[in-house]
Amino acid sequence: MLQNKLGIMDAARLAREEERISKKKAAELFESGYLDNLPAGTYQALADIHKFLFGDIYDFAGKRRSVNLAKGSFRFAPVIYLDAALENIEKMPQGTFDEIIEKYVEMNVAHPFREGNGRSTRIWLDLLLKKELGVVIDWSRVDKEDYLLAMERSPIKDFEIKHLLEQALTKEINNREIYMKGIDHSYYYEGYFVFKTEEL
């Protein structure tokens, strides 16, 4: 159970409130124009997106995690290597579709926040695609199960996730409905396991 500013002690209720509030904030992020002014492809842009979405819910919004996380048998970047991983990701090229997806995969492996990585990183990805290539992903054309399986395998083989997302590209970069689909609850990574706590 994550400590939260809402004082909620029930995990299911917290998940519902988190979804409701983060969707509202995501819409504000899109409509305000704030998102378009962020430096695409940087960790700072991702941190700003995360803080905007979750700042009303968690004190850790926009801050790097201080715990190690795993999902199933996969462990995300260890806390002791997180700063170096984020520095390396920021230096990665982002001029082509393949380069952008490779950067997205690496940011997913880094998983810099305690919660809300998937939603924040998908918005970050669309911002990057929009600024570099003039396209975004129409998430309504991405099958949830295929996406989750492809993301699980992407650190070893990224062909699947590249193919899946390339098929869903659209030039409708200012379409609010397409943007909002990226933070749909059905794409969340759930069931994190905190296997060791380390204070930064």
Image (spheres, grey):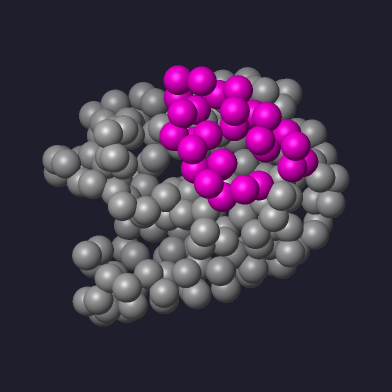
Q: Residue at x 34, y 65 (%)?
A: 58
| Residue nearest the observer in this picture, 1 or 4 | 1
Q: Residue at x 67, y 23 (%)?
A: 98
Q: For residue 52: magenta?
A: no
Residue 86 image offset from top left, x and y in percent: 43, 30
Query: Where does the image place residue 106, in percent across and percent down from the top left?
Result: 48, 28
Determine the residue positioned at 39% across, 34% down.
110
Which is more toward the observer, 192 or 143?
Answer: 143
| Residue 140 as seen in the image, left or right of residue 79 | right
The answer to whether residue 89 is left or right of residue 171 is left
Of residues 151 and 107, which is closer to you in this image?
151
Q: Is any atom of residue 63 visible in this view?
A: no
Locate residue 43, reporting x and y percent.
50, 38
Q: Name the image quarter holding residue 168.
A: top right
Above/below status of 148 relative to 51: above
Q: Residue at 77% x, 41% y: name it.
A: 169
On the rendered structure, is 45 left or right of 132? left
Provide the major secondary structure of the magenta segment: helix
Would residue 99 be found to the left or right of residue 147 on screen?
right
Q: Is residue 178 visible?
A: yes
Rendered location of residue 161, percent (x, y)? 59, 32
Magenta-drawn stretch contains 165 = yes
> Taking 111 as reference, is 1 above or below it?
below
Which quadrant of the rendered structure holds the C terminus?
top left
The part of the chain drawn in magenta is 142-169
Query: Going by the picture, which residue comes out furthest to the right?
Result: 171
Specify the quadrant that holds the N terminus: bottom left
